[in-house]
Image: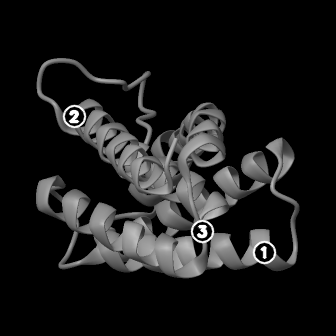
Amino acid sequence: MTVKRKKVYFYLYTALLTLVAFILQYNGVFSLKIGTASPMLMLSLCICYSMFGGELFSVIFALCLGFLTDGAASGTKGFFNTIVFIVLSLAVSMIVLYLFNNNFRSGLVLGILGSAVYYILRFIFCVPKSSLQNSVSYLLGTSMPSVIYTAIITLALYFLVKQIFKRYYVR
């Protein structure tokens, strides 16, 4: 397979995977929600692609995912998702490059840490704080299960993105 064809397939599969994640995240027909936990598929995709791509690729990909998410998400302020995705993708790619090996365990740890940071920042900037009981209920009843659910989705996407990068990514 030629280099040009590999690049086309890489970007085609990346766009297809992004489209599928976007549709699953924001459709009105069915939900991936289990109880109060709902996964953030776009965040999982951002973390997985940041683990395998370089810094520049991950920032550009996070920018695109953030614009998609901010365009469809309600309840966030301004470009919240775009900014958080860019910062998390740059952090993940630097951590994989300088601290962790790129393996299953680092995918688990970075999935948990990335989603925990996202939901904590979302709590600080986007959730109205009317009372202490509502805040604790949101953190423990909604955010923590969503962090775990997003980390599990990140592990599932890790293997898929790893195969896409192994077969089609050309540096």
Amino acid of disc 1: Leu
Amino acid of disc 2: Ile
* Residue 43 falls left or right of residue 164: left
Percent position of residue 90, x then y? 57, 79
Spatial distance from mark 2 to mark 1, Cα to Cα?
31 Å
Spatial distance from mark 3 to mark 2, Cα to Cα?
29 Å
**On screen, 152 above or below 74?**
above
**On screen, 36 above or below 87?**
above
Amino acid of disc 3: Arg
Tell me which label, 2 or 1, sits earlier in the chain.
2
Residue under the point 28% across and 30% down: 24
Residue under the point 32% across and 44% down: 12
Q: Are marks 1 and 3 in contact (CB under 8 Å)?
A: no
Quarter assignment of residue 26: top left
* Residue 124 falls left or right of residue 156: left
Residue under the point 43% across and 55% down: 7
For disc 1, the marked residue is 97
Percent position of residue 15, x then y? 30, 47
Provide the secondary structure element on which disc 3 rests: loop
Tell me which label, 1 or 3, sits earlier in the chain.
1
For disc 2, the marked residue is 23
Q: Is residue 127 visible?
A: no
